[in-house]
Image: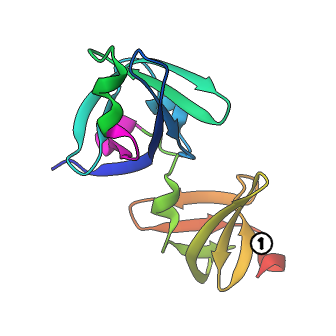
Amino acid sequence: MIKYIFIGRIVNTHALKGEVRIISDFEFKDKIFKENTFLYIGENKDKEVIETYRKHKQFDMVKFKGIDNINNVLKYKGSKVYINEEDLKLKDDEILISELLNMDVYNNDKLVGKITEYRSDNGNNMLRVNDKLVPYNKDFITKIDKENKCIYFHDIGAFL
């Protein structure tokens, strides 16, 4: 069964050749916004293939294969965009933000709580643990165990 991962929303069309504007804060854009990647659009998860991609201002601009007219993409305006989890191909040390939530947090091998929130403020990525904010920074992380839903930090006691 396909597990869909939300990556953004089509907010508008662009020009007349069928290009769409996607707003996305997905953390692995470099792995998905490229030629021949499948995207799944809307509630019905209509399968489309990326023909071209470019960045324009805050938008991810995508043109789908076989769609060369604005009238054929108007139906997607406002739709959510997904990918198939299997197409993502993350490395062992890469993790989706959604996977971090509810992970057990260890500081110097001692259980200190669970992650309840992820936030990014002006480039500072933070995790909420026990109502305190802890930097989500590779300098503090010793290990992420996806299988057992645990993240190991060192020396974050000052934040807790």
**Looking at the image, which is closer to me, 46 or 71?**
71
The residue that appears at 57% across and 47% down in the rendered structure is 25
Let me know if residue 10 is in the magenta part. Answer: no
Asked whether the viewer can see residue 108, the reply is yes
Where is the C terminus found, in terms of image quarters? bottom right
Classify mark 1: helix, strand or loop: loop
**Looking at the image, which is closer to me, 136 or 109?**
136
Q: Write the start and end of the magenta stretch as one range.
A: 76-89
Asked whether the viewer can see residue 109, the reply is no
Position of residue 116 measured from the top left corner of the image (x, y, whole percent): 56, 77
Position of residue 31 measured from the top left corner of the image (x, y, whole percent): 48, 31
The residue that appears at 38% across and 61% down in the rendered structure is 147
The residue that appears at 30% across and 16% down in the rendered structure is 65
Let me know if residue 85 is in the magenta part. Answer: yes
The residue that appears at 45% across and 22% down in the rendered structure is 34
In the image, residue 106 sits, relative to residue 11, either above or below, namely below
Q: Would residue 36 appear left or right of 122 to someone viewing this image?
A: left
Position of residue 129 measured from the top left corner of the image (x, y, whole percent): 64, 79
In the image, residue 63 sits, relative to residue 87, either above or below, namely above
Give the quarter of the image for residue 142.
Answer: bottom right
Q: Mark 1 highlights which residue?
A: 156
In the image, residue 65 sits, relative to residue 158, either above or below, namely above
Q: Residue furthest left?
A: 1
Q: Would residue 26 appear left or right of 38 to someone viewing this image?
A: right
The amino acid type, in three-letter code, at marker 1 is: Ile
